Image: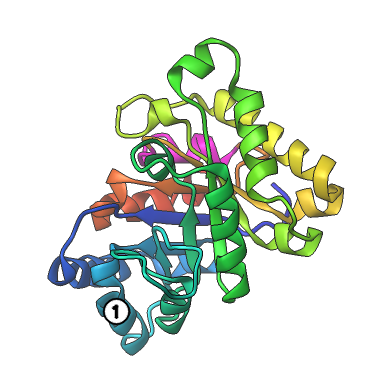
Amino acid sequence: MADARRPLISGNWKMNHNHFEAIQAVQKLAYVLNPADHDVVDVSVHPPFTDIRSVQTVIESDQMRLILGAQHCHFEEKGAFTGEVSPTMLAKLNVALVIVGHSERREVFGETDEEARRKVAAVLSNGMTPIFCCGETQEERVAGGTDDKVSGQVRAGLAGLSPQQVAGLVIAYEPIWAIGTGLTATPEDAQAACRVLRGVVADGWGRATADSVRIQYGGSVKPVNAPDMMMQPDIDGLLVGGASLDPNEFARIVAYHRLIG
């Protein structure tokens, strides 16, 4: 991994933790994380919308070295979109990272490539950084369509962005078949897909951009497989789901670097 690409470990809480539980979780996480971890790894937490203000207050008042993230947003600044949250609202809460195009948004809620593209642009225009997700189904994988699927999602979702914008964002490879199933891509499989993603960025936005963009792996990440994933040359971080709900387990994932030197 290039020195310029600082690792990013992100905890996506999904629809878990009310705001009381969120406060407790982030306080415990800050306590169990080794201060030295923050010197080499960026750590973000992505609570549900109802928790963000509470988590923001705790992070800022206790001066925690955690990055506040969100799981989703709409692409419009405001309007008649019942139940949605705008990027402007998130920016006012000092959210720094927003997950865009997660497979659950695409598969369960029907989010399209075009909607993901508009959300990426909206997040960037509000001074936040997108974590842009892509990944294939089991059927697509078996049919040999992994490379085409993730390449197409990246080209569509990042269309119109400048090399500077792409260089500063995060791309997360999250194979749909490995999310919440207990199945995990091997480090070699994950590396192969992430190498393809970096190649797509190089082709579309230049080699310097590809060398700068951070690429995460997400899909049943656990403390036991985190070090092997992070040893891969094109994997710069991890997007962690269920394991991030347990502060102790998440802290062990963040501490991967102690096992690989």
The x and y percentages for residue 241 are 34, 46
What is the residue that sits farthest to the front in this orientation? Answer: 80
**Left or right of 155 on screen, residue 114:** left
Q: How is the image coloured?
A: rainbow
Q: Quadrant of residue 11?
A: bottom left
Question: What residue sits 75% from the left and 56% below the top?
Answer: 160
Q: How many marks?
A: 1
- Examine the rendering and report whether any part of residue 4 can be seen: no
Residue range in magenta is 221-231
Question: In the image shown, does 148 or 3 lie closer to the viewer?
Answer: 148
Q: Position of residue 126 (x, y in %)?
A: 57, 76
Up/down of 199 relative to 136, above or below? below
Residue 60's place in the image compared with 99, above or below, is below
Residue 45 in the magenta stretch? The answer is: no
Tell me which amino acid carries mark 1.
Answer: Arg
Residue at left offset 25%, top offset 78%: 54
Position of 164 with respect to 142 (left or right) is right
